[in-house]
Image (cartoon, rainbow, N blue to C red):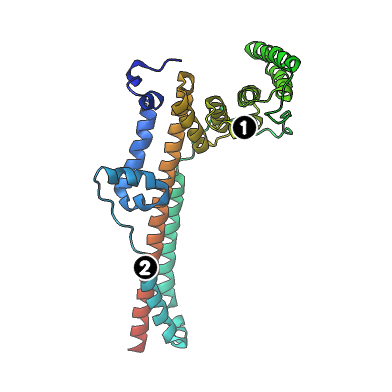
């Protein structure tokens, strides 16, 4: 299949020609918006690729924030410990005031946590996902490389034609049987990939992946096997692994029919990454609030102890 005219300048640009649609742009916008609020998140390992890209453009990445709250809290904790039983002896005299204040703070935090949890965007449902199949592995035939008789070659050729005819007619179960017969006579990466494609048409993504794995053992550059395995992983919801296979397949042999699936997978990956960054920012914010609350409690306890000792 011929690639679009504007992608013909170089082999690489032809295979990597992917247009960003509005959904992908929106996902990228969300990611950048989150990073504007929490730029230190660029130091997360999951965003190393984006950090490297920004650095290559001359951008300055803010250093990760030092975790300094622990030492401060520990100082307060050790100070409270030094007072020992003295704190306990006077605790009942002013317990109510401290407890009310403490409870109010926790109640506020719980409300806020609940609100944040409700704002969490769940992953959009993918109606095309397939249920994982658990059938026993299909026959793989004899090991490749052995001597094949003329009669076996003729029979394998006939079975290939029969398999192609069955697949074109939508009888993928028969096509699988015919390809299995071919594999018993003349196993090859392409036949494994074609049988895997039929398994995928039968909504058996795990069987498809097994056949493609077998094909890629002999030919790591099999575009057909990479495309089929990438689509099988897409239908299992493993979008990151699917994108890896589809991107490599498109670089080897660009296929317009795969472009739409790859766009969908890229958008899903971007959405997941944006949600992960957002969740990381929320966790950091909650940790900061919890540390601030502990510091405030320690400060109140310290001031109360000083009043009692006066």
Q: Nearer the viewer, residue 167 or 267?
A: 167
Where does the image place residue 152, in percent across and percent down from the top left?
74, 17
Determine whether the residue tagged by mark 1 lies in a helix, strand or loop: helix
**Residue at 68% of width from left, 29% of height from top?**
144
The answer to whether 303 is drawn above or below residue 284 in the figure is below
When asked about the image quadrant of residue 195, the answer is top right
Left or right of residue 34: residue 265 = right
Residue at x-position 44% and y-position 62%: 106
Residue 9 appears in the rendering: yes
Q: Which residue is mark 2?
A: 69
Query: In the rendering, at what x and y percent does residue 262 appear?
Result: 46, 28
Return the disc, 2 or 1, that comes first in the chain's sequence. 2
Q: What residue would you read off at disc 1?
A: 209
Q: Nearer the viewer, residue 105 or 57?
A: 57
How crowded is the residue under tag 1: few (<14 C-alpha within 10 Å), some, or many (20+)?
A: many
Q: What residue is drawn where x is 30% and y is 57%?
A: 63
Residue 210 vs residue 160, the one in the foreground: 160
Position of 179 compared to 24: left or right? right
């Amino acid at each position: 299949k011929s690639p679009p005219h504007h992608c013909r300048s170089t082999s690489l640009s032809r295979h990597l020609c992917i247009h960003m649609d509005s959904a992908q742009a929106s996902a990228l916008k969300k990611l950048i918006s989150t990073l504007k609020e929490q730029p230190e998140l660029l130091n997360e390992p999951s965003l190393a690729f984006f950090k490297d890209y920004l650095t290559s453009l001359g951008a300055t990445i803010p250093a990760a924030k030092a975790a300094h709250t622990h030492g401060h809290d520990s100082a307060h904790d050790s100070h409270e410990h030094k007072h020992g039983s003295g704190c306990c002896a006077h605790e009942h005299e002013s317990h109510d005031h401290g407890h009310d204040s403490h409870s109010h703070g926790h109640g506020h935090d719980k409300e806020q946590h609940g609100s944040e949890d409700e704002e969490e965007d769940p992953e959009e449902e993918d109606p095309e996902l397939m249920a994982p199949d658990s059938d026993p592995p299909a026959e793989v035939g004899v090991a490749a490389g052995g001597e094949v008789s003329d009669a076996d070659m003729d029979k394998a050729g006939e079975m290939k034609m029969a398999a192609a005819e069955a697949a074109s007619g939508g009888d993928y179960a028969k096509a699988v049987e015919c390809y299995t017969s071919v594999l018993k006579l003349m196993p090859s990466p392409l036949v494994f990939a074609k049988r895997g494609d039929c398994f995928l048409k039968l909504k058996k993504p795990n069987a498809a992946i097994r056949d493609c794995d077998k094909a890629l053992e002999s030919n790591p550059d099999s575009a057909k096997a990479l495309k089929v395995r990438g689509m099988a992983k897409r239908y299992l919801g493993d979008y990151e692994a699917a994108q890896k296979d589809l991107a490599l397949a498109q670089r080897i042999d660009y296929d317009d029919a795969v472009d739409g699936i790859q766009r969908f997978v890229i958008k899903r990956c971007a959405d997941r990454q944006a949600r992960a960054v957002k969740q990381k920012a929320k966790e950091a914010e909650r940790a900061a609030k919890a540390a601030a609350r502990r510091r405030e409690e320690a400060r109140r306890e310290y001031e109360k102890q000083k009043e009692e000792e006066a």
